[in-house]
Image (cartoon, coloured by chain):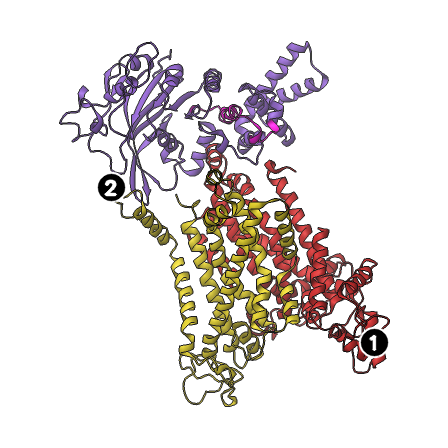
Amino acid sequence: MGKVATETVLDVNNLKVIFHTYAGDVKALDGVELSVRKGEVLGLVGESGCGKSVTALAVVGLLPPNAEIVSGEALLDGTNLLAMGKDELRLARLRDVAIVFQDPMTYLNPVLSVGLQITEIIASQPDLFIPEMIKNRLEEISAIEKSNGGLTRELQVEREKLQAASDTNRLGNDEQKRLTQLYAISILKSVRLPEPEKVFKMYPFELSGGMRQRAMIAMALVRRPKLLLADEITTALDVTVQAQALQLLQQLKEVIDTSVLLITHDLAVVAEVCDRVAVMYAGNVVEVADVTELYRNPLHPYTQGLLASVPRVDVVAEQKSIQGSVPDLMFPPSGCRFHPRCPKVFEKCPNAKPTLIEVSPGHLVSCFLFGG
Amino acid sequence: MVFVLFTLSLLIFYLTRGLLPPSTALAPYISPRIGDAGKLSLARALGVATSTCPSFQDFASETNGCIVPLWGQYYGWLVNVLTGNWGFTLLPGIAGTANTWDVFFSRFAFTAELSICAAILTIIIGIPMGIVSATHNNKLPDHVSRLVSLGGYSVPQFWFGAMLQFLFVLYVRVNGAGLFDATGALSTTCGICFSNPGVISSYSGMPILDALLSFNFPYFWDSLVAVALPAITLAITSIGALTRIVRSSMMDVLRQDYILLARSKGLKDRVVIYRHALRNAILPAVTVSGLLVAYLLGGAVIVEIVFSWPGVGNASLAAANVLDINFLELYVLVTALIIVVTNLVVDVLYSIIDPRIRL
Amino acid sequence: MRPKPLEAGELYGRRADLKYSLHLLKLNPVVLVGFIISIAALLIALISPLLVNPSSWHLQNLDLRLCWNNPAFNWGIGNVFDCPGKIYPLGTDQYGRSLSEMMILAIPIDLQIALEVVLSAVVIGVFFGSIAAYVGGILDELILRITDVFLAVPGILLAIVMIVVMGRSLFVLTLAVLITWWPFYVRLVRSQVLGEKEKPYVERLRAMGAGGPRILFEHVVPNSIYPILIQATLDIGSVILTVSALTFIGLTPSPLLPELGNLANQGIQYFFTAPWLILFPGLTILVISLGFNLLGDGIRDIFDPRLRR
């Protein structure tokens, strides 16, 4: 059960994004409001096309060239990512926020080895990583000492050198390269990849889907980010592999003390892993609540429809689906974007846009049924 | 590979000997002073007339039993060649009969120098231009580069070479001498040349290389200046082609998901472009390099003629005009060998760059 | 640059495709230039007999040698003398013929050769390439090896030898260039068909009982013809370059022949006294070749399915 900390790592306020296409403007995000609390796993659910990935990409500044951020801010620990210059943003990507994508086959560079794709992160700003690398290696050496009952001369020398270096935090070039490689291998080990030294040298096409996904998680982990965006990371995996990946995520979250925004359309995954959930529909966040609260007491008609459409093993019932279809965001519905499909629609809905209101502690809804 | 060379030699042999009357084979070697007996022994020496042929008139009127059949001629030529005897060549302008092999390879060095310089130019201009074009898609650098590359691809090389010559040799002048000198492989009368470059020892036959190896800077500089215009003319078309290929394949690659991930890792732009993107994008360009080498060697013929460059392409036109079979065969076979070897090298390079294609 | 949005319901179908194509066209306006040039060249080629008497290139008029009287431009060179009589827009050559007239006669000759070569190469390429790819086995090997042989020679040399041996005529010129060009097309078609024949619909056709040649020529080839046609358009320009290079080095039936490369060759010796003689023919070759290259490039940019969204 998630601990409720009052600090937030990510605050997305009123984010509006438009895509300019040949056919017209797609109003993809229409004022998204989102907060990720420190140390929690926030699930972001919604159907395909509702804007979940767009939100994540907007936060890290990786939207395609035809996208325009019309308004809004994304505050990472207080600083607005959307207002950052190029170099600042690059550093933020390196240190503070990492994103893991869906299909590791296309997201890993096929002509570069896995190891290189990890070490290059470290090499791009070594001073950020040196203290952690030294610490990690010293721990490794201590572990070897414990298990072998002593150290070889080589390792002893290495330990002394590292202890000296840990004061200055500077390493010679060769030392740095070697340490970088060892660190990368240890990260590969921590994501439970078998024979990490071998995997280090291998190429993406030589790995299985699950292994590739772990490699991509490793690339995020090595940065020890404050915030981890996981964009549909389980969608392309088999169910069993899915479970492993999620388990891994949870374990790692503890180890490096990060907060996670888990984007998915799979409600089961959400129930499994998340502390809180935010539900998105057609470019807006419509409901936010703790996991158990949301499943027990969904307030927004869309959430209710969503949960009702999940087939249940314990109750024999007809499969219900939400009437209508996902709106075309080039010509979105007026007012509340859900109103054409809403079973509880009334006169106010097409005419004004509802905002997120806290209905009970920690439970927010964006619906005129609850005020506004 | 052997098949290619063999078939090629057959093809050239057939073209030069098989389609015209046998007496044309003597044309390059006949001078008015040779009497009929001399002509007949020449025909025998060339393998065209049989030893039992009674007189030159019989040979010329192609009476039965006087002409060696084409296969026989080819066989005779092949045997000679395989024992290292490439016969004599009498190219117009070369005094006396000279050994084909020597004539060819002394001139080949100049062609090699020209082609290598053009190849270097192609790579150092074409690839960066393609990258810049792709990374600044639809902005000014892209438009300029597309214009230049398309222009280069469309311009007739002979005309371009002539225009360059007129511009720099005859119009742009320094101290009364044209800026460059476009005749021969070494100039001493151009505006930016040394007037007395001294001598060099001959290691490879290529002026630039030999000058470097002889530590003779004036000679080196002068040779560089001399090769500048021809190399640019030869390279202009392949620069156009290479830029376009690099541009389109870079644009393809930059759209890929792994580029998005690379950016999201906080890597510098330069690293993303040169390590992640270029590594993938260069593959089609490498594939095409084999064709480019063939193109450069072919284009050298025209460029050498326009600039009076003392290379093998220049001579090949003269050789073709007199159907000098020895020279032609040697030329074609050497070029084919180079092209085939280049393709093999390309295959190897390919497997180095792309780990998915390991042989 | 906000394009006008489509109406609701216009998102798919032919009208949407057309609008998208127009949008891409707007991004690549240079294609229109290529299109215009190509059409203009073809038009000039077609109406050339109406503009200039086709046999006028035989006539020499030594009184009119090397003169220039176009008032629009002054070369600024010493001994350019004025042509008597009517205006010659591009001056006259050393045989006293009007250069503009010779060029108008030359364009159809060059274009005709180019179109003949390219079309024949496409046909040969389609025939042998598709058979090689579809049938495979020894036939494929054989055809591949033969193309290897031709691709290992620098084409120019082969063409030179052929022309010298078989005589200097336009027919031999066309044939010589064709011989150097067809291997590319065989290879190109072969690789296209290789990719195409793996597609599921081919297997379905086979299961339905369709015979090999029928599947090949009625289905597979039309589906893979696309990049080949684009390459053909681009090659029209390249063939003109090759042909004019060959005539430039002297492989013409007659020095009087109105052909762009030949005109340039005749004119180069007079560069100081009559610079127009080499300048304009060369420029024309450049422009025509550029036109077809722009057109081919543009068509590829607009219609290549990989580049369309």
Note whether B81 is above or below A109 in the view shown: below
Q: Secondary structure at mark 2?
A: loop
Q: Which quadrant is the C terminus of chain C positioned in?
A: top left
Q: Position of residue A235 (x, y in %)?
A: 42, 25
Question: Considering depth in this image, is A5 or A239 the residue closer to the camera?
Answer: A239
Q: Nearer the viewer, residue A118 or A320?
A: A320
Hue used for the chain lettered C: yellow
The dominant secondary structure in magenta is helix
Rendered location of residue B43, percent (x, y): 81, 73
Q: CA distance from mark 2 to mark 1?
A: 89 Å
Q: Residues within 10 Å of mark 2 (few under 14, many from 20)?
A: few
Q: Is residue B162 left or right of residue A296?
A: right
Q: Is residue B311 magenta?
A: no
Q: Is residue A291 left or right of residue C142?
A: left
Chain (red)? B
> Do labels 2 and 1 touch, CB within 8 Å?
no
Q: Which amino acid, mark 1?
A: Leu
Q: Which residues are magenta?
A: A200-228
Q: Which residue is mark 1?
A: B40
Q: Is residue C171 in view from this perspective?
A: yes
Q: Residues within 10 Å of mark 1 (few under 14, many from 20)?
A: many
Q: Label 2 amino acid?
A: Ala
Reply above or below: B279 against B22.
Answer: above
Q: Nearer the viewer, residue A272 or B55?
A: B55
Res B180 quadrant in image: bottom right
Badge 1 marks a residue whose secondary structure is helix
The label nearer to you, 2 versus 1, is: 1
Colour assignment, chain A? purple
